[in-house]
């Protein structure tokens, strides 16, 4: 069995795979991995991979040192089953690369856009030849709400829960609709732009936030909340036991 440790900006995910099948996923602290010991006690883990977008805490380093199986640290030097054309691979978020691997593994030989709507919203493109061409980063939903409140004198802090009319009738609905619908239009814009050059484009949507889409686009969109985890498991399988 494989253990996947994916440490993000807000939290961490622990997952167990057996013969390519996802058995369990747990969300836990990205500073302490509180659930790691109990998860390992429930499964016979043979190897693991760790991906992180933040610096590892001392508590996590100590836990990793005690694990009785090898842990592959996923870095820009780790071999992956796609060609990475990013000009500064050492600065590329490993979660972005893992998601690209997860998408291309499921739908090979097809141009693919991966949209990860988490703390930030990332857009990553893999062409039909399995080449990671790069991508873009924009603020995530919570970041946009917080920025409107923090960088103005009178705009209130608003959450995503509630009405999102086409045009806000109050400051609260104006902010909520502006953020939520702004993100939806942003996402649709990327899809439309890429489809002009890649009519067979597939789109994978992952991350913590959900959005609605133009009905003309829905047939080409696959929602997969475990895309990064699946990509990391494929990378671990390809690299074997260290």
Image (cartoon, rainbow, N blue to C red):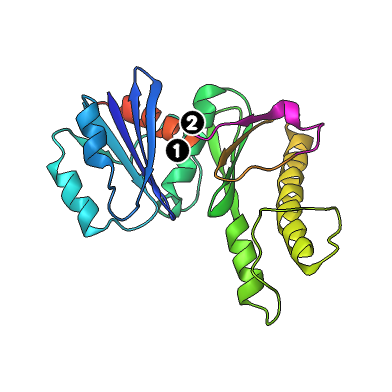
Q: Are circles 1 and 2 on residues that touch, CB within 8 Å? A: yes
- The residue under the point 75% across, 65% down is 172
- Which element is circle 1 on? helix
**On-image quarter of the N terminus:** top left
Classify residue 79 as left or right of residue 151: left
- Highlighted range, magenta: 213-225
Classify residue 98 as left or right of residue 181: left
* Residue 213 on image: x %, y %: 76, 39
* Residue 157 on image: x %, y %: 64, 69
Q: Residues within 10 Å of mark 1 (few under 14, many from 20)?
A: many
Task: Tell me if residue 219 comes above or below residue 123 in the rendering.
Answer: above
Which residue does the numbered mark 1 point to in the structure image? 98
- Taking the image as drawn, is residue 200 in sight? no
Measured Cα–Cα span from mark 1 to mark 2: 6 Å
Furthest toward the bottom, the residue is 153
- The residue under the point 74% across, 30% down is 218
- The residue under the point 68% across, 82% down is 153
- The residue under the point 22% across, 33% down is 40
Which residue does the numbered mark 2 point to in the structure image? 102
């Amino acid at each position: 069995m494989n253990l996947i440790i994916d440490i993000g900006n807000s939290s961490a995910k622990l997952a167990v795979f057996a013969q390519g099948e996802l058995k369990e996923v747990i969300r836990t602290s990205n500073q302490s991995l509180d659930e790691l010991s109990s998860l390992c006690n429930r499964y016979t883990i043979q190897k693991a991979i760790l991906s992180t977008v933040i610096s590892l805490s001392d508590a996590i380093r100590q836990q990793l040192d005690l694990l009785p199986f090898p842990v592959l640290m996923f870095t820009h030097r780790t071999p992956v089953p796609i060609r990475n054309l990013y000009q500064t691979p050492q600065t590329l978020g490993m979660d972005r690369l893992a998601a690209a691997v997860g998408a291309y593994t499921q739908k090979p030989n097809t141009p693919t856009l991966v949209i990860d709507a988490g703390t930030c919203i990332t857009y990553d493109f893999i062409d039909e030849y399995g080449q990671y061409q790069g991508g873009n980063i924009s603020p995530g939903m919570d970041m946009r709400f917080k920025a409107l409140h923090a960088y103005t004198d009178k705009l209130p802090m608003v959450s995503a829960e509630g009405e999102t009319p086409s045009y806000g009738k109050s400051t609260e609905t104006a902010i909520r609709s502006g953020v939520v619908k702004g993100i939806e239009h942003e996402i649709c814009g990327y899809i439309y732009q890429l489809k002009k050059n890649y009519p067979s484009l597939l789109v994978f949507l992952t991350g913590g936030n959900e959005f609605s889409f133009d009905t003309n686009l829905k047939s080409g969109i696959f929602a997969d909340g475990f895309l990064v985890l699946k990509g990391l498991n494929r990378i671990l399988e390809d690299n074997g036991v260290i």
